[in-house]
Image (cartoon, grey):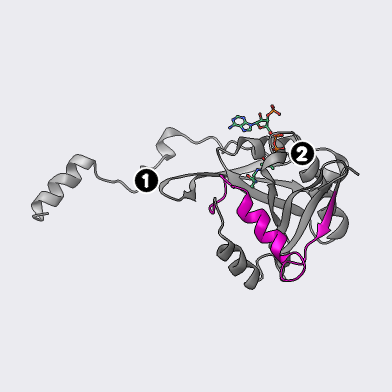
């Protein structure tokens, strides 16, 4: 196996290395782009790296050594999510695909009750979105303006998942994406029974 995972002890022996990794790298597609040491220490204290919902691992590559960090999240919910962060020097080299494949294999082989493995990424994180598709994950949602951006307009959040049987059979289970056909008369005008012009007239009438 090219990729292996080493379980982290975030509050113990891996504490300093975890703070170093999170503060040394930038994460342009995360809500916290530049975590501070205090941010990471606070997260460690809250159990964000290891508790009943979270479990964190170093990502090790057979030739390259330690290349990144992976956390499984929502572990008590039945459908885990993940947080995957390659270190800066290991991005843009096609490593995301073997890492996500290894993460999926880990979930399927060590979490027998899990049927779905899912995650979301920002719409402009093309590298992550290509990685999902190349690993057999399927896009299931595109949440318009669903991803807050510090100091900017929100972007869309895209949601992908893989099913246990997709992984086991190598066949992605699909579904009909397009909605059922509707007649134009079925389409309601999103709560605007009155035209903007009428709204203005109404407001003037009430002295606003
Ligand atoms: C996201 C991540 C795991 C992807 O892994 P990676 O190995 O770096 O991705 P790749 O190098 O294989 O890039 C995938 C593709 O995206 C393309 N790509 C990357 N950025 C792009 C951009 N801005 N516009 C268009 N294409 C882009 C690459 O060219 C590549 O395409 P190609 O293989 O067809 O040439 C990794 O970059 C990473 O850890 N980033 C920081 C943390 C992060 O964003 N994690 C995801 C949180 S959900």
Percent coordinates x, y for residue 148 in the rendering: 47, 51
Residue 157 spot, x, y in % from top left: 55, 45
Residue count near mark 2 (Cα–Cα under 10 Å), binned few <14, some 14–19, many ≥20: some
At x 88%, y 55%, the residue is 109
Residue 169 showing in the rendered view: yes
Horizontal and vertical percent position of residue 114: 79, 58
Cα distance between the residues tagged 1 and 2: 41 Å
Q: Is residue 121 shown left or right of residue 161?
A: left
Q: Earlier in the sequence, mark 1 or mark 2?
A: 2
* Mark 2 residue's CB less than 8 Å from ligand 1: yes
Q: Classify 10 Å Cα crowding around label 1: few (below 14), some (14-19), many (20 and above).
A: few
The stretch in magenta equals: 4-32
Q: For the point 59% across and 62% down, which residue is it?
A: 37
Q: Say which element carries label 1.
A: loop
| Circle 2 SS class | helix
In the rendered image, residue 10 lying in the magenta stretch gets the answer yes
Tell whether 107 sits left or right of 83: right
Q: Quadrant of the C terminus?
A: bottom left
> Quick check: 112 above or below 199?
below
The N terminus: image quadrant = top right
Checking the image for residue 15, the label placed there is none
Q: Can you see residue 80?
A: no
Check disc 2 and report the residue beneath it.
97
Q: What residue does disc 1 label?
A: 190
Q: Nearer the viewer, mark 1 or mark 2?
A: 2
The percent position of residue 87, horizontal first and vertical second, equals 69, 46
* Closer to the camera in the image, 35 or 131: 35
Res 128 → quadrant: top right
Relative height, residue 168 to residue 50 (above, below): above
Q: Give the mark count.
A: 2
- Residue 47's quadrant in the figure? bottom right
């Amino acid at each position: 196996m090219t990729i292996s995972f080493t379980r982290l002890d975030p509050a113990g022996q891996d504490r300093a290395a975890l703070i170093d990794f999170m503060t040394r790298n930038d994460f342009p597609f995360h809500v916290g782009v530049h975590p501070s040491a205090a941010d990471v220490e606070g997260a460690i204290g809250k159990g964000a790296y290891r508790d009943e919902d979270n479990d964190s691992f170093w990502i090790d590559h057979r030739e390259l050594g330690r290349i990144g960090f992976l956390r499984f999240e929502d572990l008590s919910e039945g459908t885990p999510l993940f947080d995957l962060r390659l270190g800066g020097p290991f991005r843009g080299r096609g490593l995301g695909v073997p890492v996500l494949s290894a993460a999926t294999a880990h979930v399927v082989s060590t979490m027998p009750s899990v049927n779905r493995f899912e995650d979301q990424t920002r719409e402009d994180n093309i590298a992550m979105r290509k990685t999902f598709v190349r690993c057999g994950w399927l896009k299931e949602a595109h949440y318009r303006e669903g991803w807050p951006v510090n100091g900017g307009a929100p972007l869309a959040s895209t949601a992908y998942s893989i099913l246990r049987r997709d992984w086991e059979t190598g066949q992605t289970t699909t579904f009909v994406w397009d909605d059922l056909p509707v007649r134009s008369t079925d389409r309601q005008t999103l709560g605007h029974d009155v035209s903007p012009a009428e709204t203005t007239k109404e407001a003037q009438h009430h002295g606003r």
